[in-house]
Amino acid sequence: MKVQVIFYSMYGHIFRMAEAVAEGARQVAGAEVSLWQVEELVPEEALVKSGAMAARQAFANVPVASVEQMAEADALIFGTPTRFGMMCAQMRNFLDRTGGLWAKGALIGKVGAVFTSTATQHGGQESTILSFHTTLLHHGLILVGVPYSEQGLSAVGDMSGGTPYGASTIAAPDGSRTPSGNELTLARAQGKRVAETALALKKGRAA
């Protein structure tokens, strides 16, 4: 049972969340979990100037995803930072190349999920995930979020991301905040739930 975690990260926040999502998915017996990043569109000189190039060294060894590989997965978990309340251009570009998969119905019945990050507490976490869901629904994916049985969703003592639509983190406007323990716990929970759902569906279809 194959789970692909496909992400875009500029300063490493989404990469750290992707690692946690993958950790959660690997808790499910039989899950083969892989990490992939989408192609960068920003020129290298701009990445260097913004300081992103140094941060990206942490996941420089993660292979670049191809559109075609998604047909091999049983579950697809996408991670994207928020850009004005929606997914980033790099992820949008990746998804906009999936017309061939859509025409063949290649993703119908697979499990799908989304996680995100924002600079501020109310910077569009929910709108990013929900608008991302639109594309996944067009492909016929079965969506999985984070249920309120996860107590971390109800935590109010400290600032934290986390929505019922998907895991999330808050990076701070200068990118200085790293994912908190609660945010990583919710990311692991989402990864585990996606893998469990995909495995149950796979067993059901084989019965």
Image (tube, helix red, strand yellow):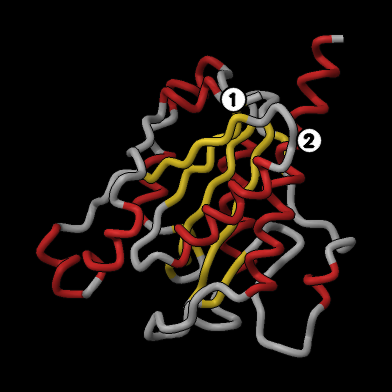
Q: Quadrant of residue 93?
A: top left
Q: Residue at x 33, y 59 (%)?
A: 58
- Whether residues under marks 2 and 1 lie with C-beta atoms below 8 angstroms apart, the answer is no
Residue 13 locus on image (x, y percent): 46, 67
125 up-or-down from 109: above or below? below
**To which residue does mark 2 refer?**
197
Please name the amino acid that badge 2 sits on. Thr
Residue occupied by mark 1: 107
Q: At numbered mark 1, what does the secondary structure look like: helix, strand or loop?
A: loop
Q: Is residue 139 left or right of residue 14?
A: right
Based on the displayed image, in which of its 4 quarters is residue 187 positioned?
bottom right
Q: Nearer the viewer's eye, disc 2 or disc 1?
A: 2
| Rendered residue at 68%/55% (across/down) | 188
Question: Which residue is nearer to you in this view: 46 or 15?
Answer: 15
Say if 57 sits above or below 35 in the image.
Answer: below
**In whole angstroms, how far apart are the C-alphas of marks 2 and 1?**
15 Å
Amino acid beneath label 1: Leu
Q: Residues within 10 Å of mark 2 (few under 14, many from 20)?
A: some
